[in-house]
Amino acid sequence: MPPFPDVHPPVCPPLPLLTGQKALVTGASSGIGKAVALELGRAGADVCVNYSSKEEPALEVVRELEAMGRTAFAFKADVAQESEVLAMFAAVRDRFGDLDILVNNAGLQQDAPLDEMTTAQWQKVIDVNLTGQFLCAREAVKEFKRHGVRPKLSCAAGKIICMSSVHEVIPWAGHVNYAASKGGVMLLMKSIAQEVAPHRIRVNSIAPGAIQTPINKAAWDTPEHYNALLKLIPYKRIGEPEEVGRLAAFLASDYADYVHGTTVFIDGGMTLYPGFETGG
Ligand code: BGC
């Protein structure tokens, strides 16, 4: 264990950076997506809480947002299915009118050694993590181009944040489908960013490292696993979903208006080659 307590940062009072803006967060019923939805809400945004299977946790996020005084609703859609994505964007139009922020968060892992990975495992991860981001970004860009910049709300016509991973650059044995999907997200994001910048649409990625969520429970659920995980993190603690949520709120806001086409890593230094901590 590190020679200091496992101190996590305080939750700072939010700035009303996103007042009046409308956001869609995919995969928002748990983990990082839930925290992003809540932090966007704290920053003033109304939120469509997308979920793929379990309604009750999504409704709980909606209730939390409403308790903050926000307008929110839950919408069930599998982001890998074009017809469901189209229905979701139609619902956002009906309920919110305009859309200002898309957080392309929905993602999953289906891990297996390469020689045991089924085509179904490969395809599922690519479909949700990569095709899902393409479909939602495409529909969001149509919305953003339709309404253009509304200066009272934001300097940009719209903002897209793609949830990537440190595995957009760190190869990951036993997870080739996931790493390939996140590597794909990196150039999907950058190519969209290059294409839509003249429309004042901002596009960026967040690349989290180890964040304490259900997706990686096996990496932190026992002291042994947690200590093994810390070897990969120079900052010697796991991240909290709220930290990613606050970064998303910043990136979606005009404070980040000149941040475009880039990936912000939030990983306690996981991408710093921690194996070299003690020399090469
Ligand atoms: C994965 C987690 C993993 C983390 C760091 C994330 O993208 O979803 O399971 O703990 O990367 O390896």
Image: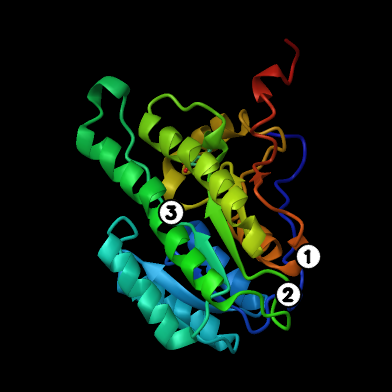
Image check: 256 left or right of 193? right
Image height of 19 relative to 116, above or below? below
* Quadrant showing the N terminus: top right
The Cα atoms of the two marked residues, 2 and 3, are separated by 25 Å
**Numbered mark located on residue 54 in the image:** none
Percent of width and height locating residue 156? 68, 69
Q: Amino acid at mark 2?
A: Leu
Q: Residues within 10 Å of mark 3 (few under 14, many from 20)?
A: many
Q: Residue at x 52, y 62 (%)?
A: 103
- Badge 2 density bin: few <14, some 14–19, many ≥20, Cα 10 Å: many
Judged from the image, the secondary structure of the residue bearing numbered disc 2 is loop
Q: Between residue 162 and residue 235, name the one nearer to us.
A: 162
Contact? badges 2 and 1 (CB < 8 Å)? yes
Question: What secondary structure is found at the residue carrying circle 3?
Answer: helix
Q: Answer few, some or many: residues within 10 Å of disc 1's Cα (few below 14, many 20 plus, some between 14 and 19).
A: few
Marks 2/1: CA distance?
8 Å
Residue, disc 2 = 17
* Residue 27 visible in the current orientation: no
Residue 255 circle label: 1
Q: What's the residue type where badge 3 is placed? A: Gln
Residue 211, image x, y percentages: 56, 48
Question: Marks 3/1: CA distance?
Answer: 24 Å
What mark, if any, has residue 133 been given in the picture? 3
Camera-side residue of 231 and 137: 137
Amino acid carrying mark 1 in the image? Tyr
For image coordinates 36% across by 67% down, the residue present is 51
Query: Which mark sits nearer the N-terminus, 3 or 1?
Result: 3
Can you give x and y, in whole percent of width and height, for residue 223 in the image? 53, 38
In the rendered structure, which disc, 2 or 3, sits on the residue that comes first in sequence? 2
